[in-house]
Amino acid sequence: MTYPQFAVLFACLCTHMAMAQVPVGATTPPAGRAVSESDYLADVPTVISVSRLAQPLADTPGAVTILDREFIRMTGARELVDVLRFVPGFQTTTAYEADATTATYHGRNDDFPNRIQVLIDGRSVYSSLLQGSVGVGWQLVALDDIERIEILRGSNSATYGARAFLGVVNIVTRDVHDTQGAAASITRGENGVADAGLRLGWSHNGGAYRISADTARSDGLEGANGKNQTSRLQLSAHLALEHAAELELRAGNVQVQAGRGDPADFSGNSARPWTLDSHFVQLDWRRALDESQDLAINLSHTENTLRDIFQYMVPGPYYMAPIDAGGREVVDSVTALHTVRLNPALRVAWGAEFRQEDVMAPRLFDLTAHMATDFFRVFGSAEWRLTDQLLLNAGALAEQSSSDGGTLSPRLMLNWHAAPGHTLRAGASTAFRPPSPYEKYARVRYRDINGQNPTPYFVLNEGTLQREKLFSRELGYYFAPENGNFSGDIRLFQEQITDGISQSEGTSPDTYWNVANDDINGIEWQLKWTPSPATRVQLTQTWTDIHANSAAGSNTRFRMEHGAPRYAASLALMHHFDRGWNLSVMQQVSEDLALMSTAGRGWLFSMKRTDLRLAKEFRLGGNQAELALTVQNMGDPYEDGDHKFLFNRRTLLTLKIEN
Amino acid sequence: MQAFLRSLRWCLAGLACVLAPAWASTVCVVSSSKVAAFQEASDVLTQELTRNGLARQEVQVVLGLESAEGGACLQDARIVVSLGTDALRQVLARSPHPAVIAGLIPRSGYDQVLTEVGKKTAANVTALYLDQPLSRQLDLLRLALPKGRRVGVVWGPESVSLQGALSAALQQRGMDLVEGSVNDGSPLIHALHAALQDSDVLLAMADGAVYNSATVSNILLTSYRARTPVVAFSPAYVKAGALMAVHTTPGQAGLQLAGMAAHFLQAGALGASQYPGNFTVSTNDYVARSLGLSLDAKTLTERLYKLEKRP
């Protein structure tokens, strides 16, 4: 029997969920004595407190896709973005050219996906470097450390802030109590794939801990410059405190080394290596105040340093001049969240966040020391069960930015449980994405090798750029018949972007304008079918129509209109055979998508990719082990991210051991 | 039932007039604790006995037997009702002692006390267990989770004695047992993961080595993360985050203990030890909804009674 999958926790709260205990009277019996009446009569602290209670998918204010650990493992994916290919409406690339491997929802306005939010255990990994991007975020967690990924398809600024413009990807890592013991994995394969991971979990004095380290290396895409390597070290701890409060500590260090650029280009885009170092520390304190309310406080500090520098090699006065797109950002955030059940029909979560983002990129801001932006957000969400059949999710987030002023992003969603297992929903929301510091303030010019003789500006922004706006409407249908072995949803969406931020086209210097008005319309659906406990089928299809009305120029308009494929689909078939054999077959198709560096050519690309994974579970020296053979892209190479980059067939062998 | 109670009332009234000296306690209730559960049980027990004919003075409630009042209570009583393990131990430590009905005590705790005191002392003692028969728990499980076939259990040193009985009961119902155990020295989390492996429900069996104040959080959270509902053994666990439990409230126990005492006063003999006939199903509606389940505690209680052919 399977129960409906978890959705996002109520409001913004998956990752702020309180894990609290409250002493409520008589003490509970201690360990290590005979069963007595106190086992049956004593009070027990509240554990599954109000904010821990996940909303069933039938109650969520929008469509949600859940990718669980089992599914992720069975795909044989090495990159996080690779599993997002199985989410309706998502586009992904494994190219490290504009960014690290990346994914976005319903297209993008340029090479940097900056219209969705990505959270890892509640911490935003959106980077404000360059145009703003979640690309780096995908590198910050190892797939083996992930418990599940919750993808909220549709705008969610009312809960998650401005960056949740078109959607949210919420990554929940494995609980430290579930990863006690040791685990190791190693992957070798074609295309220079060499991955290795090690994890150790232990308990001490009531605390539970995990340390995990891994490295993932490959030769990248054919035609792309450079090999890619990501190295991660992560520490997680869970401590039980007095008064039944709990504290979680997470810290990590991630380094990405990759290549970008064109070996034939010696001027603006030379082939060169680039690196990104990311460090973070995060503290989550939680306590249930009583049975119906709890409080969570989250603190995080993140530092990202991008090194991307090369020399201008065209003979002349600027020969060997440094061209530096690097930068450093420091992000500090503190969030307080109070969740309360006012009565059986009404649950409310409200809170506030203060966030400071400090970006230092002297070469991009023309020697300005740094661009600091303070955000103050107050948010609230209510889940109001009007009747047994009607559920209203209402929320709003007010955001005050030191750079862009204030906005209010409301959302309303009405869920009608028309029949058991069948829910219709309709709703609307608004959102505002503030420009990144680069989009608003970038002033790029170069100096000669002696730091003298500045060129004219190549990019010039005067700080007048405004937020882009979104009005989103959707109709949805969620189905999970009580006695059926399938579930899924259909989402009909209309997303209208006005004052969209777009780079100028054919101007000198380049600048960012609020000139794009885009209508994104379409329908997407997903189905999960488990014809037997050993078999799982997941199917998705998406039809997207984007109408762009951009004054920036025809090329920009073309990229936007085809930023999402006209049609995309994915199919995953997974089966557990007897004696520990597992087989997965996955296929993805995508039709009519614009890629990078095809400006003015009007080229659209289609792709089809089929993956196969065959694995055998067995015991090895008393440990659980699995040997897996994965073939990625069994068919012809396809263009990935750029028309010059090809994803070739790769055969990988992975051994995992866990005690 | 009503007719029985009426005749019982008259019998008790008659007995009270004929047999009871002016200030002697016919029924001595020895309680282990003053906490609310014990108070509720003794209150209901007293009210029910007096409602059915005993004079209020004939029912004496004492906290343990340490005081002179306790000793006098025991000495004068025809029947002793002990509430809790400590009270039973204290009563059985007195020799001789009147007939004893042990209440608010789980079966394993009762058996252990009887083993401690030996056969001779254990004679003339019976019990109303606090815990529920396995059959009732499994019936509830089937009523509430009809699709649940695989039942996870974590065994500890106390509960493992039920392993054979549970396994047989599950087999009889076409259900499977998924087991984990801490008895081989395994950490609880490993035993829990073993019990949750592909199981549809985790059936909690009281055992201090498994379920205690230090472990409850991890057990409930781990099960919740695994989307496996927990069927617990007490309403406190339901409040904490288990899906449901069938249990006997202290008031229900007090009521049944009164009936057993009255039966003794009338018949002069103790019946066999028994599981509670009265029970209640508690559900955590929020957890149920979150797991996509729809449960109604009242309906489940009624259906469970109906299944046992009780009103």
Image: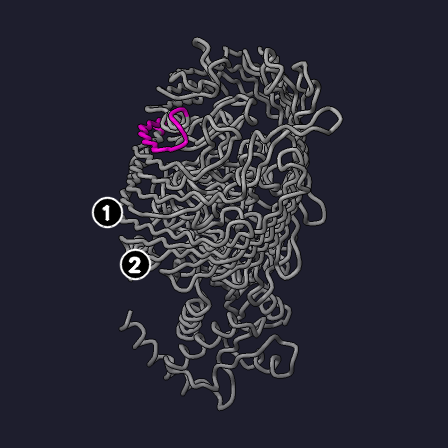
Q: Which residues are magenta?
A: A530-555
- Is there any visible trace of residue B194 in the rendered image? no
The residue that label 2 is drawn on is: A386
Q: Which numbered disc flags the more N-terminal residue, 2 or 1?
A: 2
Could you tell me which chain the residue with mark 1 belongs to?
Answer: A
> What residue occupies the far top of the structure in this picture?
A636
Numbered-mark total? 2
Q: Give the quarter of the image for residue B285.
A: bottom left
Indicate whether A131 appears above or below B160.
above
* Amino acid at circle 1: Ala
Instruction: Report helix, strand or loop for mark 1.
Output: strand
- Residue drawn at (68%, 38%) of the image: A367
How far from the left and from the top, in percent, is residue A379? 47, 56
Q: Nearer the viewer, residue A480 or A270?
A: A270
- The colour mode here is one colour
Q: Nearer the viewer, residue B33 or A123?
A: A123
- Residue drawn at (38%, 33%) of the image: A551
How far from the left and from the top, in percent, is residue A359? 63, 41
How far from the left and from the top, in percent, is residue A121? 56, 43
> What residue occupies the far right of the structure in this picture?
A450
Q: Which mark is residue A418?
A: 1
Instruction: Report helix, strand or loop for mark 2.
Output: loop
Indicate whether A463 appears above or below A532.
below
Q: Give the quarter of the image for residue A280.
A: top right
